[in-house]
Image: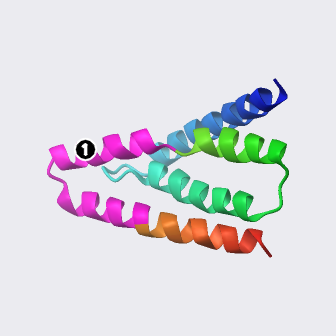
Amino acid sequence: MMHGMMVAIGGFFGAMSRFGISRLFKKYYLSDFPYATLFVNLAGSFLLGYVIGSDIPEPGILLIGTGFLGSFTTFSTFKLENIQLHANKKWKPLITYLLLSYTIGILFAFLGMALGRV
């Protein structure tokens, strides 16, 4: 029961944080490029790497890793935005988005893990 509560609490705050960041980016970046999703996914990759690399006890991993970061980051929105860019034939933003998301996301996850072990 306690583990489920940790995930739920983290999930609430992660979803609200992503919502707030998305609104903030839409206010300042009037573009077809999905800056908000890129930001939350890259930040989430780094932070999850850090959490996993750290010696955080299981309740903390459930709260921060599974709950907060699980709802803060978004794979489904990432895929939808890629499909929309492809459908609208926006090739340069599509390729840029894919390259940045995958290469920097993996790099940030490794960097987070390395820093978490320090």
Q: What residue lies at 58% left-to-right and 65% top-to-bottom?
A: 109
Query: Can residue 96 be found in the magenta stretch?
Result: yes
Query: Can residue 82 be found in the magenta stretch?
Result: yes
Residue in the foreground of this view, choosing between 52 and 35 = 52
Give the side of residue 46 with respect to residue 83, left or right. Answer: right
* Amino acid identity at mark 1: Ile
Q: Is residue 15 above or below residue 85?
A: above
Q: Secondary structure at mark 1?
A: helix
Magenta span: helix, strand or loop, mainly? helix
Q: Position of residue 51 (x, y in %)?
A: 73, 57
Q: Position of residue 32 (x, y in %)?
A: 30, 49
Q: What residue lies at 46% left-to-right and 49% top-to-bottom?
A: 37
Q: Position of residue 56 (x, y in %)?
A: 83, 55
Q: Quadrant of the N terminus?
A: top right
Residue in the foreground of this view, choosing between 95 and 51 = 51
* View extreme (top): residue: 1
Check the image and tell me how it is coloured. rainbow
Q: Position of residue 14 (x, y in %)?
A: 65, 39
Crowding at dot 1, Cα within 10 Å, few <14 / some 14-19 / many 20+, comes out as few
Q: What residue lies at 62% left-to-right and 73% top-to-bottom?
A: 111
Q: Is residue 105 above or below residue 72?
A: below
State which quadrant residue 35 falls in: bottom left
Q: Which residues are magenta?
A: 74-102
Residue holding disc 1: 83
State which quadrant residue 4 falls in: top right
Give the side of residue 100 with respect to residue 60, left or right. Answer: left
Q: What residue lies at 64% left-to-right and 46% top-to-bottom?
A: 69
Give the side of residue 81 with respect to residue 75, left or right. Answer: left
